[in-house]
Each structure stands twice: as structure tokens, then as C-alpha cells.
Amino acid sequence: MTTTAVMGAGSWGTAFAIVLADAGNEVKLWGRREETCKNINELHENTDYLPGIELPKNIHATSDPAEALAAADVVVLAVPSQTLRQNLNDWGSHIRSDAVMVSLMKGVELGTHLRMSQVIAELTGAGPERIAVISGPNLAKEIARREPAASVVSCADESVALRLQQLCHTQFFRPYTNTDVVGCELSGTVKNIIGLAVGVCDGLGYGDNTKASVITRGLAETVRLGVNMGADPMTFMGLAGLGDLVATCSSPLSRNRTFGEKLGRGLTVEEIMAQTRQVAEGVKSCTSVAELAHMHNVDMPITDHVRALVDGEMTPTELVNALLGRSTKPETH
């Protein structure tokens, strides 16, 4: 049995805590709200984010980060990406110097343009052998219901990836390994932006041809950025790439696709955010990814246009018309 800490009791953090517990590990789950933690410990249910799903008895929740991290060999980070820096500043000193840190987060930090693994490295001083990423078509509610799913465990040190693979392998959750952390992180980040764009198409009433076109061209611009930044192009064809993209763009459980659909229907970002407590990471990441693409001189038109829509510079119809009106070029341009 390995002692693990999952830092973040939202839907994905709680769902992954279920995976770790099912695999036989002792799990400490940290949440900001004491009431959430009390419900998890007494009712064995996260009534805020995964109501109706019974949690394993080997998950213990706490609102004290020092308690959660004290004995953890593996620390899973499941906070919103744009809050990671502040969270690590608050409780990162409690992470053991030999603990492996695993990012479930999908974002690029605003201002610094750092991937989450880079933020972790900067604030903790950990080397690449202590930082891993888990990413794939992993909608939290389906994972929590123990519906069959696969994912990717990525670490620059393959032996660490293999160790983590065993740590979260269950009857319902099948992890694969790779060493392309850059590709996994960029895939997970950009797919949220493409999910917003596909949601906009849904909100406008467009059909499957339109959405398939956006998904495919969205994948193309993700690959362009990834290859420019040193990623393996094959990563984008796998679970962390195409797999996650398809799940995000096709499921009503996807926060980003749902957020985009509401944008397509004419709601503002502020109106949508007032309706939900869930974080649609693409709303923030579209700005940092668009800036990252410009820094690397990579053409990412869908990302650019989603950023303009989110910032109120463009309407949903104008977004679609602007993409269709771009100059023609070969598909592999």
C-alpha cells in the first residue's frame, strides 16, 4: 500500500482518489471546505461535485494540507491550473522532498506561459524524475462511476511512469506510459480550447460536419505548437491527444464544450460563470496558449478566435465566419 495525497476535492480530484483507492492505496484527499471533507468522511460521498457516488472507505478527507501531505509518497495535484502557484506557495513546503508529484491539471499559466509541470518544478525545486502528468479521455463522472477508461502516465523518467502506472491500474482504469510530458500537457490544455469552439458550433445549431472540421483542424494546430516546442507528434494521436480531444468535444459532461455551447447561444462569460461552480479551464488558457503560439510563431487560428470571443471582441457567428474566410491553403500547411 502506498500513501497518496490528492490535493483538490473537486470532481476530477475526487474521481482520481477513487481510482487510487480502488487500486489498494491509502488516500488522503484535501479540500478547501471543511463541510465537503466532513461529508466525504461521514457519508462517503462528495455531495458538492459527485453526488450519489459512494466513495471507498480508504479515502480520508481533510481541510488541513499539512495533514494530507505529511506521509504522502505520491502527491496528486488537482487544483485549478491558474491557482496552482498560490496553492504551492501556501502548502508546498509540506510536500516531502522525495515525494513524486503528479499533475492532473490542464492549463498554461497566465503571464508566465509555463506548463503546470514547469510551475511545479519552479516552486518546489523538484527534478523531472519527480514530476509526472496524467492525461487522457477521463471525464470525471464516468471515472467515478467506474466506467472503463484509459489514460496516459507521463514522466521524463520511465521508471517513475511505470511505478505510477501500477499505482493507478484498476479493473476499470487502464493507464499507459510515455515520456513526452510536453506533448501530454499541451494536448490536455489545447483540447479545452477546441472544446469551447465545438460547443459554440453546438450553440449555433451547426451539425456534425462543422464540429468534425473544428476538431480536426484544432488537432492540427495543437500538433504544430507541440512539435515546435519539442513534443513527439505521435503523442497527439494517442489517448492524451486525440482521445482526450474527442471526449471533451463530444460529451455533455465536458465543462468546456458546455461552456462553449452557452457562448454560442449568446450568453456572456460572466453570465455563464455565475451559473456554475465548475471551472472551464479553456476560458483562461485560451489567452495564455494564444500568447505562447505567437511567441513560437505558430499559427493557431481557432485558439486566437476563441480568445477573441471570450474577451468580447467577436461574436460566435463572427468567429465561425472569420475561420471560414481565411485564405485557402494545403491541408498539411
Image: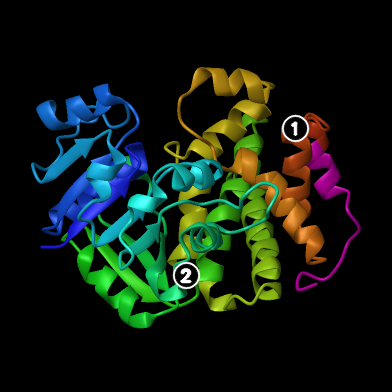
Q: Position of residue 292 (x, y in %)?
A: 73, 58
Horizontal side, residue 313 vs residue 223: left or right = right
Mark 1 burial class by Cα count in 10 Å: few <14, some 14-19, many 20+? many
Mark 2 burial class by Cα count in 10 Å: few <14, some 14-19, many 20+? some
**In the rendered image, which residue does mark 1 sit on?**
316
245 shown above or below 279: below
Helix, strand, or loop for circle 1?
Answer: helix
Q: Position of residue 25 (x, y in %)?
A: 14, 57
Q: Which residues are magenta?
A: 319-333
Horizontal side, residue 182 vs residue 44: left or right = right
Horizontal side, residue 69 vs residue 116: left or right = left
Q: Quadrant of the N terminus?
A: bottom left
Per the picture, the main secondary structure of the magenta-coloured stretch is loop
Among the 4 quarters of the image, the one containing residue 226: bottom right
Counting every numbered tag in the picture gives: 2
Task: Identify which amino acid the numbered label 2 is placed on.
Answer: Gly
**In the rendered image, which residue does mark 2 sit on?**
238
